Image (cartoon, rainbow, N blue to C red):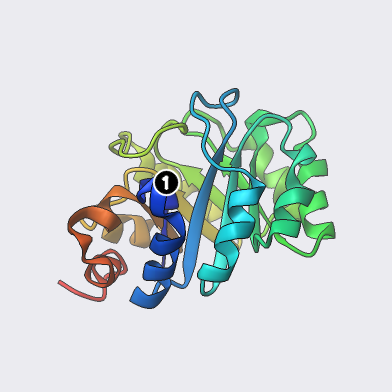
């Protein structure tokens, strides 16, 4: 089980320090929520932030592009050092083009699925997908509780994902992490639950099921 800390929950004035502290605490994966103020209400990070954080991240840096027309931005995030670039099918009529562009740049391609989005298109896109991200909250803000029924959706996606990484993003806590793991989640994105209390290493272990 991989726990991917969401840097959206870190102190925005100390992102580099947070990324370094997470690496020192044992995080093997870090998640950067990129929001454009159009696809989702908030505006957060860009490729320049990704590039600045790259030296502080030990392991995988995952850029989650919650932006319209993500195919226009994948090259910038690949150049900035993102290992995984995830796009939303709801954000572009050319999602296959976006996914293939990510892979052509030598990065792993992720496809994010919003809570209300069906899974019919997923089976046709899987040949271009390395990771499926199941959004278990409506994207655009951190700290939201997980929506009802999302564990079942994770299970349904796991049945289609055919061994690919299955990321769960939104409202992940130590309480619901075991159910998400049993449903097939392999990468759990956690923000508020991870940074709460300042015990990064302990919270990582609890979310990963390695500590009580």
Q: Residue furthest front?
A: 13
Residue 163 seen anywhere in this rendered image of the structure: no
Identify residue for label 1: 8
Residue 206 is situated, as x and y percent measured from the top left of the image, at 23, 67
Task: Give the answer, above or below, for where 28 lies relative to 195.
Answer: below
Q: Residue at x 74, y 47 (%)?
A: 74
Q: Nearer the viewer, residue 183 or 173?
A: 173
The local crowd at label 1, few if under 14, some if 14 to 19, many if 20 or more residues have their Cα within 10 Å, is: many
Task: Give the answer, above or below, for where 35 lies relative to 104.
Answer: above
Q: Residue at x 49, y 28 (%)?
A: 42
Task: Give the answer, above or below, for where 207 lies relative to 141.
Answer: below
Q: Nearer the viewer, residue 18 or 194?
A: 18
Task: Give the answer, above or below, for where 140 lies relative to 166.
Answer: above
How many discs mark residues in the rendered view?
Answer: 1
Q: Residue at x 52, y 69 (%)?
A: 57
Left-right relation of 73 to 151: right
Quadrant of the frame with the C terminus? bottom left
């Amino acid at each position: 089980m991989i726990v991917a800390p969401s840097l959206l929950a870190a102190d925005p004035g100390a992102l580099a320090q947070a990324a370094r502290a997470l690496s020192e605490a044992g995080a093997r994966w870090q998640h950067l929520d990129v929001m454009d103020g159009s696809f989702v209400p908030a505006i957060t990070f860009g490729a320049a932030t990704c590039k600045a954080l790259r030296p502080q991240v030990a392991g995988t840096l995952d850029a989650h592009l919650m932006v319209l027309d993500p195919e226009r931005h994948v090259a910038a995030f690949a150049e900035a050092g993102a290992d995984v670039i995830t796009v939303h099918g709801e954000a572009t009529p050319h999602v296959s083009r976006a996914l293939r562009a990510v892979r052509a740049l030598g990065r792993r391609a992720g496809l994010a699925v919003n809570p209300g989005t069906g899974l019919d298109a997923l089976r046709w896109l899987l040949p271009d997908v390395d990771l499926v991200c199941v959004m278990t909250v409506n994207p655009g803000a951190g700290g939201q509780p997980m929506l009802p029924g999302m564990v079942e959706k994770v299970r349904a996606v796991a049945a289609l994902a055919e061994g690919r990484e299955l990321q769960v993003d939104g409202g992940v806590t130590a309480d619901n992490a075991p159910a998400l793991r049993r449903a097939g989640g392999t990468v759990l994105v956690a923000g508020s639950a991870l940074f709460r209390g300042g015990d990064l290493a302990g919270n990582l272990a609890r979310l990963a099921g390695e500590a009580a």
